[in-house]
Amino acid sequence: MANILIHRITNANIYMDGANLLGRAEEIELPQVKVKMAEHKALGMVGTIRAFSGIEALEGKIKWASFYADVLKKAANPFKTVQLQVRGSLEGWNTPAGRNTEKPVVAVMQVLFKNFPLGQFKQHENVEITTEFDAWMVKLTAEGQDILEIDVAANIYKAGGVDMLANYRANIGG
């Protein structure tokens, strides 16, 4: 019998500037890292290649479970970033033992909220509010290992803990 290893994350918690928001958000969509690629073609090449040229804006959103004044006051300010931290528990399952590990998965982001819906009110229904944000910095760790770190303002891009832009920063003097 083959030993199958399955990883699952089925829940998480959000913190804003260190404050626990347990039960206040229905879901969070973390940014998707989209790499910009620039084409290069030249005489003597039989084709065109594309190479890394930057990162597109890191966008995400949070669907709030209701109206929370303390949270929404921070989201209403488009001039001040806030720190968001999302914490999940990565469960490892295998056959025949069942669940055999639980390890943390943590995403830390410095974000600036970019929209502020006032809500939609309906009789006998909870108010749903979804805020969107741009992340200026994001760091993802899983099982105690650095997976990805991007800090756009500091020209940092680390994959697996390796600084991919160290030479670039040295070359441009910053």
Image (spheres, rainbow, N blue to C red):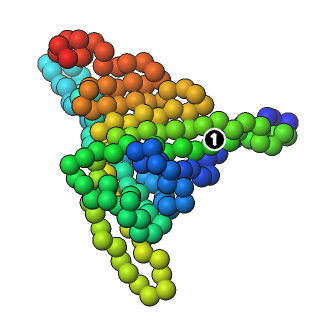
Query: If the image is split into quadrants, where does the N terminus sit?
Result: top right
Extreme residue in the left direction: 43
> What's the residue at 49%, 61% (across, down)?
24
Image point (23%, 11%), residue name: 170
Residue 41 in view here? yes
Q: Is residue 86 above or below residue 43?
A: below
User: Disc 1 residue type?
Assistant: Leu
Where is residue 28? Give x, y as percent.
Answer: 45, 54
Q: Nearer the viewer, residue 171 or 14?
A: 14
Judging from the image, what secondary structure is the residue with disc 1 in?
strand
Q: Can residue 130 be spotted in the picture?
A: no
How far across and down, in percent of the image, does residue 101 sit? 73, 36
The quadrant where residue 135 appears: top left
Residue at 31% over, 56% down: 75
- Residue nearest the viewer, comparing 9 with 36: 9
Give the residue at the far bottom of this rendering.
Answer: 123
Left or right, residue 158 beside residue 40? right
Q: Decide: few, some or many residues near mark 1? Use Cα within 10 Å; few <14, some 14-19, many ≥20.
A: many
Q: Quadrant of residue 71?
A: bottom left
Q: Find disc 1 in the rendering and name its residue.
A: 90
Q: Quick check: 57 above or below 24? A: above
Q: Residue at 54%, 55% (x, y): give it.
A: 22
Q: Nearer the viewer, residue 117 or 94?
A: 117
Q: Nearer the viewer, residue 89 or 92?
A: 89
- The picture places residue 46, in percent across and down from the top left corner, at 24, 22
Is 117 situated left or right of 19 in this image? left
Q: Position of residue 79 (x, y in %)?
A: 20, 49
Which quarter of the image is occupied by the C terminus? top left
Counting every numbered tag in the picture gives 1
